[in-house]
Every structure is written in C-alpha cells, then in structure tokens.
Amino acid sequence: MRALLNDIESGDPGGLNMSLGEPQHEIPEFVAEILYQERASYHKYPPVAGTPDWQQAVGGWLERRFGLDEGMLGADHLVPLCGSREGLFAIGFVTIDRQKAGGVPLVLMPNPFYQPYAGAAIAANAEPFYVNAEAENGFLPDYEALPEEVLERTALCFICNPANPQGSFASLDYLKKAIRLARKYDFVLVGDECYSEIYDAEAPVGILQACMELVSAGEGDPENPFDHVVCFNSLSKRSNLAGLRSAFMAGDPVIAAECRRLRNYGGSPLPLPVDAASAAAWRDEEHVIANRALYRRKFDLAEKYLAGRFDFSRPSGGFCLWLRVGDGEQAARALWREAGIKVLPGAYLAREDRNGVNPGAGYIRLTLVHGEELLEPALAKIATIL
Ligand SMILES: Cc1ncc(COP(=O)(O)O)c(C=O)c1O
C-alpha cells in the first residue's frame, strides 16, 4: 500500500482510512470499568486456560448463539487467545506434520483470504493452497471439487464465515460437507467466525452448530461432536475491542489441548482483568445489538450511494464492501489522490491462481468502520470519483 501511494499527495489530509478492519465505534463502558476494578490482579501470572468465569461465559455464549446443548463447551474445548490472529497463525504448528500422504502438507484457504492463514502454512513448512472464492460460487471456495490427491495431502483448511472481504454466508449444508471432507481426509477444519455478530437480516450459522446437526442426525462421534473441527471468534469486531486483544478458539478438545500446550510454552495468557472484562462482554448482548443497528444504518448509506454500480451488493455480514472497479490499484490511487481516501486494492488480499489470474485484481475493499458522519461524505466522494 505504501509503495502504491508513496508518490501521490493525498487530495485531502483529513481524508479517511477505509483500508483497515478496525472498528472506530465506542467500546462498551462496562469493559473499561471492569479493567479498572480488577487492576490489582495485574501482579499475577494468569492461567493459560483462562479463569473458570471466562470459560463459563464463552461456553455459554457459544451454546446460546449456536443452539448447542447447555454445558457441552467446557474448559477442555476452549483456548483463550490474545486476538484470534495469533491462534489462526499458531494452529499450523499443532496440526501440520512434516509430511502428509507422502508429500509436503497443504493448507487450503479461500482466495482472497486473511493473510495469517498463509502465514500459518508457511511457518509450519506446509504449502498454502489457494481456492478461488468468486462471485460465481457465492464467494465460497469449492473444496469438495478439489482433486483427490490435493485433499489427501491437506493438513489444515480455513473457512471464513462471514466471508472477508465479500460478506457472504456459508450455509449449514456447505459447512457439513466441509466437515465430512475434513474427517474423511483427516485434516483440521477451521471456521474463522470473527464477523459472525455483524450481520444485516439474519445471523449466520456456525461451524460448531453444523457439527451438532450432524451428530443429531446420527453422523459423527457423539462423544466428540467437534471431531476435527474448531472455530475462532473475537471481541475485536463484535464489541469494538480490537485493542483489548481478546478472542478464543473452541471445538475439538484434542486440538484445543495441543493449542493450550503450545501457549503454555510460548504464548501469553490473557491478563486476569482482561479475562474478567471479556467474560462480561461475552455475557452482554445489548451493546452488540446496538452495534449491529449502527452497521445496518451504514449498509443503508452504502446502498444509497453505490447500489447498481461496481457489482455492489449489500453485505449479509461483516463490515466490508467488495467493489468491482476494473483495476483495483488504479482506483485506490485515484481515491487517495482526489479525496485522501485509503482503500485496499483487492489484489493485495489474494494470490494468483493456477491460471495466473489474481481473483482480487478487479476489486477494492472498503471497510465501513467509521461513524455515519464521516462515512456518508466519503461514500459520496467514492461514488463520484470512481
Ligand atoms: C477474517 C479475519 N479473521 C481474523 C481477524 C483477527 O482479528 P483479531 O485478531 O482482532 O481477533 C481479522 C481481523 O481483521 C479478520 O479480518
């Protein structure tokens, strides 16, 4: 981005940075209060597994949100994380062996993708395997269509739901098929669900929910319903707490135990005041409902200025717009030059596919993270300039 925009002066020094996924909304006040109330415990080394109160709050939230049986997600299934990024990266170390099916292991991911997925593969000496997520397939990678030899070598696979940057949802059917595939070919399936609480009309389903449905239908192991499967979620987007660094991984207890062991040696547990504040945030839905209402109003604004152009579609979830502008880099330069608005060229979120085509090249990604008063004039300028 820096190299792309370096030689251009910003058209408006007071412009807007719409290239980052960092919500600018207010944090819930009670979180700040709890951090302060609990400050005395900063002298203690916190537990890697989180406090029982944190475990109960997170397990309870997952159970309520995804219609799981009460009490089924306990300490064994959970790993506290300092933001989901570190866990999405580190999971490669505990799930990827040196070889799989006689070759270098593969890590499947959508293309475009959240960059730590590829980091997880490369750092664990595996190969990222990019599967295009384009408009024609509802922006969901078709893992089922991959050749047998690819699936046999797969050690780890990522699904981003809601999809970043396109905001589409995976259905229960899609998730169930992916779970079956993971079990058949013995790879770990990750549901990256950090945008799950920002949605428009309906809440997206989750990967643990799909596991439960399979077990209820007599498929899978009732003793370990989440066999081969984990999900990640975070307070960064749901509660506007990107700077708190508070997230979790949940699912298969065997994988969770390995992740906790890794963090025991080389990770950093959440400080006790953060455990307490996070537990309260997961228990509270009021601030999340208000946050969602605010995003809906911003989707309305986006629709007002962009509907019918650039293949705009109102996102089902998440807070990004994925606009087809022809040449993403050129559009990003124009917006910077003329209005000081920073957006991300879609190509930077993706890699060339096997035909040498970057599926993000024609797009830009905009994040709707600012308040309406800043967003509306920016959207009006974007529509005019593009
Ligand atoms: C798709 C996706 N997954 C995970 C994350 C990580 O968020 P955090 O580390 O704040 O939990 C982000 C952040 O932008 C993201 O866009």
Image (cartoon, rainbow, N blue to C red):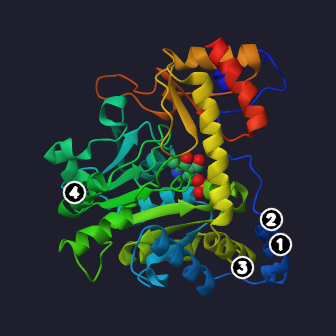
For this rendering, which residue is in front, 5 or 104?
Answer: 5
Query: If you read the primary sequence from the N terminus, does the residue marked by circle 2 or circle 4 appear first?
Result: 2
- How far separated are the C-alphas under marks 2 and 4? 43 Å
Q: Which amino acid does label 1 sit on?
A: Glu
The numbered mark, 3 or 2, whose residue comes first in the sequence reads 2
Residue at 56% across / 81% down in the picture?
55
- 263 left or right of 242 in image: left
Q: Position of residue 120 (x, y in %)?
A: 45, 52
Of residues 320 and 230, which is closer to you in this image? 320
Say how many tags the image has.
Answer: 4
Q: Residues within 10 Å of mark 3 (few under 14, many from 20)?
A: many
Report crowding for label 1: few under 14, some 14 to 19, many 20 or more residues within 10 A (C-alpha).
few
Q: How far apart are marks 1 and 2 (CA)?
A: 6 Å
Q: Earlier in the sequence, mark 3 or mark 4?
A: 4
Residue under label 2: 29
Q: Residue 181 carries which label?
A: 4
